[in-house]
Image (cartoon, grey):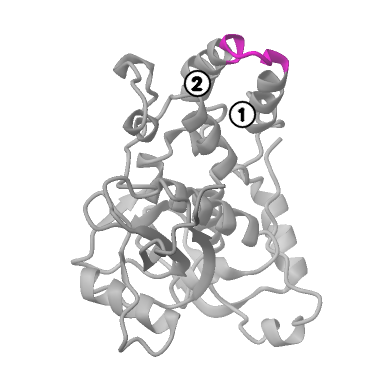
Amino acid sequence: MSPIDPTPEPLRLELSAVVVAVTADEPRVLVVGDALPSGPLEPDHRTLELGLRAWVEAQTHQPLGYVEQLYTFADRDRTPGHSERVISLSYLGLAKEASPASWQNWYRYFPWEDWRGGPNRLVVDTILPRLALWADEGSEPHQRRQRIAVSFGASERSWNEDLVLQRFELLYEAGLVPEAARTRPIPADRLVPGEAMTHDHRRILATGIARLRAKIKYRPVVFELLPAAFTLLQLQRSVEALAGRRLHKQNFRRLIEAQGLVEETGEIEVGTGGRPAKLVRFRREILAERAVSGTKLPLSRTA
């Protein structure tokens, strides 16, 4: 029996943030180069959240509004090249985009997640054929094909927008994303489009997108991303941007009205080139009214 090494593995605690905004009907994520805002927990940070807010503001000058803890990432191989094990406590934050911070469209990193124009051609024409080849290479092709069918439904009805992380991890396992090439040789022509991020930050981002897509269906957090007054079309386009799906306009408005989520301000938006639209605002008191049952923001599809 070999002796147990008494030397503990060196650890470093990192705080990282997936900070999201919606600008010009596009979902945006705050980045620092090819990474998410992040930094170590320091002795003068009174709480984890205050430490996270301090790092984001120091690195990007972007103040944060709504923040919630996302997940803890502690895989030993998540930061290749580091002598210590880096544990990342991640947070999801919602903000309104402000300069001079660096914001990027999150579909730059996950181009297969945008189905607002119908079936995503990258999925249909490139990803599914390459995953099919990968399935046939394995010892259990039926099991692999089943996983592909669940994660990458090729039709609008079978596509589940919440499975962002499962899709990314399947692409990683199949050797179709650049992050997989850090640990094994993979031909460049095998990789699918989508910009890589440092370490496992794209995996963290996928987790944040999945959380937010699920959350907008049962909590009205999308209003944290909107101005004080907005049109119903702006609200719909913001939900669509986050979900990556087009919504049925009449059904969406009918459900918004039935939920009592907004009220008219008495003003209209003009100068947009179209018909003047009524401005509304979020009824924030509804959160207290429905604290127990929750408030559902509808994600009704066109199909």
Helix, strand or loop at label 2? It is helix
Of 3 and 217, nearer the camera is 3
Drawn side of residue 49 relative to residue 265, left or right: left
> The C terminus appears in which quarter of the rendering?
top right
Which stretch appears magenta? 135-142
Q: In x, y percent, where is residue 196? A: 32, 39
Q: Tell me which corner region of the image, top left, top right, bottom left or bottom right, holds residue 181.
A: top left
Label 2 sits on what residue type?
Answer: Ile
Q: Which residue is mark 2?
A: 127
Q: Look at the image and say whether residue 204 sits in the magenta stretch.
A: no
Question: What residue sits right under mark 1 in the picture?
Answer: 152
Which of the two labelled residues, at mark 1 and mark 2, occupies the earlier sequence position? 2
Q: Locate residue 30: give its quadrant.
A: bottom left
Q: Residue furthest front?
A: 1
Sort mark 1 into few (<14), some (14-19) or many (20+) by Cα contacts within 10 Å: many
- Amino acid at dot 1: Phe
Q: Residue furthest right?
A: 293
Magenta span: predominant SS is helix
245 w.r.t. 230: above or below:
above
Query: What residue sits 35% from the left and 20% below the top?
Result: 186
